[in-house]
Structures are given as structure tokens and as C-alpha cells.
Image: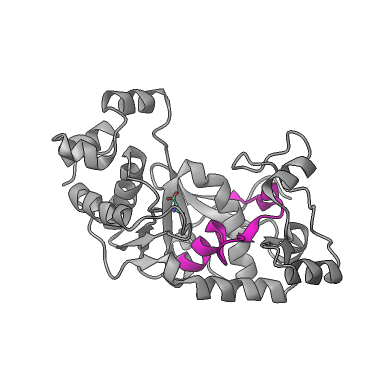
């Protein structure tokens, strides 16, 4: 792996058609200040670039997502002054597209079933080895199950996830090192090296639904022609895995901008002074959207 990626050039920005950005919340709770920062940052950049702005509901977690949270998202966005173009996609309606992408990876021999439970995975993990989400790094427990064992467990009705064979996947990528273009806070592009290996054999299809966040987000960003992904620094490491999936699936890699998080001391103070409340509660309490922008460090809407 080379230490310095090639610099980003003007062409990195010109490779795409008209800009398309998106806000992609998961409706498993009310939106908070961090969501407001994400939605407004993306929306402001879309307007600055003269691009389109989409909203996508990431509701693959059928057990945790609620329709009332989706209604709340629309109300919050309207209040924030965020307008979106075109229809809102819901990931729960797109499982077929994720299955097709998974079939493509499986046909290349890059997926394998894993029947292990969370506690089995934890027990087998090397102590202290964590993935970027802080979960026990998968040790490869079911990477080499025999076809007979897979057939036996499947026939017995054991649920399985599908995992990416990371080592094989990295061998399949022609352009090493994998890189992507990121915009810094001033929107200056730099080329970054992606290191997906730190995710290990990531789950691409969960036991309960035929996708995972990583697969769905990559498939949909491509299907919606997203040119610029704006999201929080909490998803910085995920971008490494996304760049790999894009390369494996033959999808374009968008430009990424990872915005600061409202979790530093100032952020915690802010959340505390505002009562650690949802956007809906702040709105009901009489806060004005321009004041909210100011509080989270954004310029007023003009
Ligand atoms: N659905 C994710 C979340 O609410 C965001 C996904 C993304 O922007 O890539 O955290």
C-alpha cells in the first residue's frame, strides 16, 4: 500500500453529471441536533453546487422503524427549511435490488453464510480486536464451513447472515490502493486511501433482512445517482468499506464529505442547555430554525 494517494484533481469533481445529494435518516427514533446538522449541511452544499437534494428513508431495520418517525422526519425537514426533489425512496421497498447485488458478489465467490450467534462470535474473537463500530472483530468462525455442514444447518432451519470474504474481495480489486475523494470543511477535494480490511468479513446480508446498512447504502447511492455523500464523521470508517463494495459491484464512488459531530464538549453543553431534546420538542418549545442553525454553527438560511 502506498503512503500517499494521488492528489485529487479538478477532474475528480468533473467526472459526474449534475450534483445529486441526499439525506438518509433511519426512522428508528426522533431526529436530534446531529440529524439537523447532517440534513442542513447536505442541503446547503446541494444549493451551493446547484444540485438536487433527495431524502431516502433507511428503514431496513423492520423491528425498530416506525411510520410515525417517518412522518416526524418530513415535519422536521420542512421546519428546518430543507426541501427535497423527487420521490422519497424507502429501503424496505428495495430488498430485491440488494438481493441482486448480493447475488453478484456471491457469484464471484465473495460471500459465505455465517450461522454464528452474537455470543459465539464474541467468544471466538481475539480479545481487544474490534471493528470500527467497536464490535468484536469477526474471527472467521464460519468462513470455511463445508458444503455439507451448510446444507445440514440450512435444512435444520438455522438462520444465517452472509459475510463478505474480505481477503478474497481485496484480491478482486484491480486498482490498489482503493481511494476516494473527500471534501474538507472548505470543500477542497483531497484523495483518501480506503482501508476496508479493518472491517473484517463484514455482514452484507443480515439474518433477518437480505441486506445490511453497508450493502443497501452503496446500492442506493448508485441507483439514485448520488454524486456527493454528506454525512457525519461517525461514518468515516464505513466509507472505506463502501469504496470496496463500489469497486466490487462496478459502481461509481461518489465524492464524500464527512461533517463534524455534535458530540464534543461544546456539543454536549449545547444538548444539555437545549434539554437534550428532539427537533420536534425544540420546535414545540418555540425555537426558530435560524436560531437552531446558529446554535449548531451554521450560517442563517439566506
Ligand atoms: N441511515 C444512516 C443513519 O441514519 C445514515 C446513512 C448515510 O448517510 O450513509 O445514520
Q: Position of residue 111 (x, y in %)?
A: 71, 66
From what the image shows, is residue 194 above or below residue 128? below
> Magenta part of the protein: which range?
192-220
Quadrant in the picture for residue 49: bottom left
Q: Position of residue 93 (x, y in %)?
A: 43, 71
| Scheme of image coloration | one colour
Q: Residue at x 25, y 56 (%)?
A: 74
Residue nearest the observer in this picture, 48 or 80: 80
User: Is residue 298 inside the magenta stretch?
Assistant: no
Residue 109 in the figure: left or right of residue 19? right
Q: Position of residue 86 (x, y in %)?
A: 28, 70
Q: Furthest-front residue in view?
A: 156
Q: Is residue 253 visible?
A: no
Q: Position of residue 210 (x, y in %)?
A: 57, 67
User: Is residue 209 inside the magenta stretch?
Assistant: yes
Residue 92 in the figure: left or right of residue 108? left
Residue nearest the observer in this picture, 47 or 63: 63
Q: Residue at x 26, y 66 (%)?
A: 85
Residue nearest the observer in this picture, 79 or 242: 79
Residue 197 in the figure: left or right of residue 24? right
Quadrant in the picture for residue 178: bottom right
Residue nearest the observer in this picture, 110 or 242: 110
From what the image shows, is residue 234 above or below residue 273? below
Q: How many marks?
A: 0
Residue 238 in the figure: left or right of residue 262? right
Q: Is residue 27 visible?
A: yes
Amino acid at each position: 500500500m502506498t503512503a500517499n494517494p494521488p492528489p485529487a484533481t479538478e477532474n475528480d469533481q468533473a467526472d459526474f453529471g449534475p450534483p445529486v445529494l441526499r439525506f438518509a435518516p433511519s426512522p428508528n427514533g426522533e431526529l436530534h441536533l446531529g440529524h439537523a446538522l447532517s440534513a442542513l449541511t447536505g442541503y446547503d452544499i446541494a444549493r451551493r453546487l446547484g444540485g438536487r437534494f433527495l431524502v431516502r428513508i433507511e428503514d431496513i431495520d423492520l423491528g425498530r422503524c416506525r411510520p410515525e418517525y417517518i412522518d416526524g422526519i418530513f415535519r422536521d425537514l420542512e421546519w428546518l427549511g430543507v426541501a427535497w426533489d423527487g420521490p422519497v425512496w424507502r429501503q424496505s421497498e428495495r430488498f430485491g435490488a440488494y438481493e441482486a447485488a448480493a447475488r453478484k458478489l456471491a457469484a464471484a465467490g465473495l460471500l459465505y453464510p455465517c450461522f454464528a450467534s452474537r455470543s459465539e462470535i464474541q467468544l471466538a474473537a481475539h480479545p481487544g480486536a474490534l471493528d470500527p463500530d467497536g464490535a468484536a472483530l469477526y474471527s472467521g468462525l464460519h468462513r470455511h464451513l463445508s458444503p455439507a455442514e451448510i446444507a445440514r444447518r440450512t435444512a435444520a432451519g438455522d438462520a444465517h447472515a452472509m459475510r463478505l470474504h474480505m481477503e478474497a474481495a481485496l484480491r478482486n480489486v484491480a486498482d490498489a490502493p482503493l481511494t476516494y475523494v473527500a471534501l474538507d470543511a472548505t470543500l477542497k477535494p483531497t484523495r483518501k486511501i480506503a482501508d476496508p480490511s479493518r472491517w473484517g468479513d463484514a455482514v452484507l446480508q443480515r439474518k433477518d433482512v437480505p441486506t445490511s446498512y453497508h450493502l443497501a447504502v452503496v446500492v442506493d447511492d448508485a441507483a439514485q445517482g448520488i454524486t456527493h455523500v454528506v454525512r457525519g464523521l461517525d461514518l468515516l470508517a464505513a466509507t472505506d468499506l463502501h469504496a470496496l463494495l463500489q469497486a466490487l459491484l462496478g459502481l461509481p464512488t461518489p465524492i464524500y464529505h464527512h461533517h463534524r459531530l455534535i458530540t464534543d464538549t461544546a456539543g454536549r453543553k449545547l444538548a444539555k442547555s437545549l434539554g437534550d431534546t428532539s427537533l420536534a420538542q425544540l420546535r414545540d418549545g418555540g425555537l426558530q430554525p435560524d436560531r437552531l442553525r446558529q446554535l449548531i454553527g451554521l450560517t442563517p438560511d439566506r
